[in-house]
Amino acid sequence: MTDTLLRLNDLTMRFGGLTAVNALSFEAKRGDITAVIGPNGAGKTTAFNCITGFYKPSAGSVTIAHAPGRELLLNKLPGHSIAKKGRVARTFQNIRLFGGMTVLENLMVAQHNELQAATGFGVLAILGIGRYRAAEAAAIERAKHWLNETNLIDRADDPAASLPYGAQRRLEIARAMCTDPVLLCLDEPAAGLNPRESIALNELLLKIRAGGCSLLLIEHDMGVVMKISDHIIVLDHGKKIADGTPIEIRNDPTVIAAYLGEGDEDDPDAPIAESFADSTVVPMEDAS
Amino acid sequence: MKELTHNLKDAAAVAFVAFLLFGPFLGLQLGDSPQGNLTLSPRPALLAIAVGLTFIARLLMLFWHDARGRAKPKLKVAAAMQKSGKFIAPALLVFAVLLPILPGIDNSYIDLGVLIMTYVMLGWGLNIVVGLAGLLDLGYVAFYAVGAYSFALLSENYGLSFWECLPICGLLAAAWGIFLGFPVLRLRGDYLAIVTLAFGEIIRLVITNWVALTGGPNGIDDIPHPTLFGLSFSMAGGPGTFAGFFNITPSPWQRDAYLYYIILFLALMTNWVTLRLRKQPLGRAWEALREDEIACRSLGINLRNTKLTAFAIGAMFGGFAGCFFSTREGFISPDSFTFIESATVLAIVVLGGAGSQLGIVLAAMVMIGVPELLQSLQIYRMLIFGIALVTIMVVRPRGFISTRRPTVSLGKPKIIAAELVAEGRG
């Protein structure tokens, strides 16, 4: 059974005279991996920032339903409550880790709200009484779980900034998962990964979905998108131009036109469109 | 060889700049001729010495930089520092506890100890705001003033004693921390620094001009000294005094030592609370805030509350220190709470290595102790002090102890190099 988890209703975001997202409506189903694709400047990241509360949309609404019928308006929540009450976690296109803190600390910060509730306004925990110790032990266990899932357990005590790029990407996902979200939003998770890392990422994302968390991702790497998405939404110039399963999207003439047409020669996304036709969807370069 | 020519060229260029700068100041001297006219006489020797010294100093610095660039003992040195830190901290603690009863320590040293300890406490308090949360606060003296005036006014008007007022002063200062924190929540970096600086000045100006309440520039005097369970430290002796109760001869040492132990206790309490908080979600959220504010928000951390608690707790310790300051001095006026105090405390935090508790102790000893101990050098005192500070910042640009210890670890905790730790952008 699938039902709607996230619904965007005529979402519009204007920056002065520029309309980055124009009356965008779509639905993401519970338990699905929904991908948002589109050429550069199509408004993907802007839409993402509206969903995760970093921008206040100029018009329209974003709704999340933790259970069928129990809906919550995300665009009315203050920024930090999106993660806390809305249970929507996100990662960033340019990785944003706490570089000077260890991998484990990064994951502990992600569980801040739960842990803070156990400290008795900080006073009890300073005096060493109350249930903080147990809460911290539980938080470390959860962190360990995600470190195992992301294959980072050996680096737990290293500063996050010292990790290689691919590991930093995985850590960011682990950190987002530690907030216990119902929807994980990933902004280009495969950017800069080599093919092997890309495949590992696919497995990780599928594992997260199997764990009951739905995913929404922006991605340029069609290898990732076509392989694991259940549903794809295509944006161009702030508008939705297509919406459907990977097979439908691959054969949609408007999508192919958006990627190949309109004379945008130096569009770095152009070659990607070729992988629509190519069903083997292996990324072009072999970085390793 | 190539290095040598490069270094020589560089040093020559610097010497030329020095020549231009020193030329008018040192190279020429105005004087009076016997006829009463102004004369201008050259002083080539002095100018040559100044330029020559600059040349040599620059050359030595370049060679030293080259040598340092070749050897990369960064983390090794840090690890050694950390290891020795394990011994330095307890050794300093034992020394601090025993200071008043050590032989050869007279009252002037105890006084100096009290002064240094006050700044250590202020440094530790500000460290919460600047070092952990990464919020640059240039108006910390405001909370010091709030604490000092709270005690002075409460004792003057309601006859409350030091120990009754101490928590009230802390609470009032914390309240002001929140009150002043609200408007600056959205400000970062330079803007935050400027606004906090202004708040520090506003508090001082209000104190100066609200004559009816604070006595204005005349200040408040006759602030009572602290008592030990009701026993005063009066020199007169007799019943009701410390000396009278224990049947010993009263001496100024007793009062000074008592003051010293009060501030030692307050400072250690500050340290203990900070160390405990650091290992808690709140402390980790502060550090995360320093590292990346946007990521914090995406993880559901309430930035407003986190920043305000940092301001409030930092201000509270400033309030405690202010309360102590007014009871020690017995007299306070707005002159004690000028911007230079904020700057000194901030310098202690930065010099010590923002975030490091031990570093702040060392920095306070350098910043406060060295000028006092150099009193005998008179006019050269501040020159030597300035050179010392510049040297320290050249050698250790991130402060004495700039490495970071993780707050939680699965295995043996590893020290984090300063290069990876963010300084915070306010």
Image (cartoon, coloured by chain):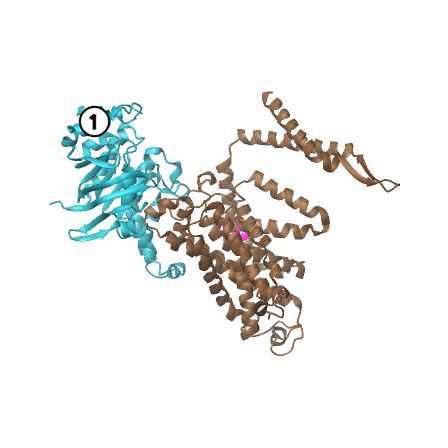
Chain colours: A cyan, B brown
Position in image of residue A242 (x %, y %): 18, 34
Position in image of residue B213 (x %, y %): 56, 69
Q: Quadrant of residue A39?
A: top left
| Residue furthest out toward the left | A1
Question: In the visual, does B398 lie left or right of B56?
Answer: left
According to the image, label 1 marks what residue? Answer: A257
The N terminus of chain A lies in quadrant:
top left
Q: Residue at x 29, y 38 (%)?
A: A20
Query: What amino acid is at disc 1?
Result: Ala
Majority secondary structure of the magenta segment?
A: helix
Magenta residue span: B87-91
* Relative to B372, residue B222 above or below: below
Q: Residue at x 68, y 44 (%)?
A: B383
Question: In the visual, does B162 lie left or right of B306?
Answer: right
Q: Is residue B195 magenta?
A: no
Q: Is residue B90 magenta?
A: yes
**Looking at the image, which is closer to me, B181 or A151?**
B181
- Crowd around label 1: few <14 · some 14–19 · many ≥20 (10 Å): few
Position in image of residue A131 (x %, y %): 32, 59
